[in-house]
Amino acid sequence: MKKQHLIRLVIVIVGAVFILAVSRKLWFGKAKVTTPDSIPIPVKVYRVSEMDFSDVLPALGTIKGSREIQLKFSTSGYVKDIYFNEGDQIRKDQLIAELDNREALVKLEYAKKEFEVNEKLYQLGSIIQSKLDQSRLEYESANLEYDKTKLSAPFDGYIGTIEKEKGGFLTQNDVFSDFVDFSEVFIEFGVIEKDIGKLRIDQAVTVRADSFPRTVFRGRITSISPMVEGQSRTFKVRAKIDPQNEKLKVGMFGRVEVLVYEKDHVLVIPSSAFRTRGQERFVYLIKPQVPGPNDFIGDEFANNQPTAMGTIEIKPIQVVYTTPDAVEIGEGLNPEDLIVSDMQQEYQNGALVEIVEIQEFVF
């Protein structure tokens, strides 16, 4: 028993001596101190490159014909017959619909016979010229009243929504249907004030309709309104679509893209990769350190080992053109430069960074 107590005592003494030795080394030894400046900041970067750069202005619009009118009868009455359906193509002067014209037809027949009788009497010398002229005017008036009961196409086009069915009553103010000249197809869309300066006559546009998502319709701007439209506070722009319009119908919803800027082989960076201070614009350029055997090599990370290290240089740049997503750079950068792309904070010159991801393309 005494021997076991002795062994335990020896173990306790040895442990105490070991702990004391370690503590003295930590206290009096030259321990390495890590300062905040020596801790690398993890960053995502973009590799600057040349590319073809363009900017498009999106808008929403409506498909239109070259002429659109409302068809109305010139007199009141009940609809007798309708000879076409909605969406049908109709040639100029074809009869579209007519009202109940029995009363007008009776008056026309009576006036016609009166004129024919008076014409014979005049030839026989039984009536004077004024009597003949009066009967001719009554006949022409009756003919006009009869024509008012008929509705014909004013030009080649398509009939729209028919507002009244057969048997319905119409007045001179009621719209029977819309009628559209679709020999030329347009799209009308609104553009807000800050973007209107980007547009010009004959500028190229592309249009996509929800009904044909895989088809791209192309066209060019033909007119730009000189003033703001109503409550929308937009300028109305009209573009003529190239003649492949069999699919498009009046009133269809169209998604428009206007090419407002285009340049080939320019330096482009993400719009999130630059900062503004007063009139100066700058990026955080990374000056890579010499890589070690386990550091970043070429375009790949080596075996999940520590990534590339570098230091920050605040680099002024010349911005040529900006979009919400990308920026064209004129001066200040070169191809293959690495810049901070996802900035979570401000950086100081010489700050140590650790590259955790490299982005190669803006779009």
Image: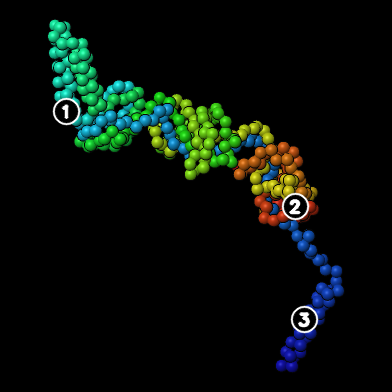
Rendered location of residue 263, percent (x, y): 64, 32
Q: Give the image quarter of residue 31.
A: bottom right
Q: Residues within 10 Å of mark 2 (few under 14, many from 20)?
A: many
Q: 274 above or below 25?
A: above
What amino acid does circle 2 point to?
Met
What amino acid does circle 3 point to?
Gly
Kindly indicate whether the residue at mark 1 contacts the one at mark 3 (C-beta within 8 angstroms).
Answer: no
Q: 82 above or below 42?
A: above
State the mark number for residue 15. 3
Q: Is residue 258 visible?
A: yes
Task: Say what secondary structure mark 3 lies in.
Answer: helix
Residue matched to label 2: 309
The residue that appears at 51% across and 42% down in the rendered structure is: 233
Cα distance in 3D space between marks 2 and 3: 43 Å
Of labels 2 and 1, earlier in sequence is: 1
Task: Say what secondary structure mark 2 lies in.
Answer: strand
66 relative position to 152: left or right: right
Foreground mark, 2 or 1? 1
Task: Say what secondary structure mark 1 lies in.
Answer: helix
Q: How many marks?
A: 3
Q: Give the image quarter of residue 136.
A: top left
Looking at the image, the residue that sits furthest to the bottom is 2
Q: Residues within 10 Å of mark 3 (few under 14, many from 20)?
A: few
State the mark number for residue 103. 1
Foreground mark, 3 or 1? 1
Q: Give the image quarter of residue 86.
A: top left
343 relative position to 95: left or right: right
Of labels 3 and 1, earlier in sequence is: 3
Quadrant placement of the N terminus: bottom right
Residue in the foreground of this view, choosing between 146 and 152: 146
What amino acid does circle 1 point to?
Glu
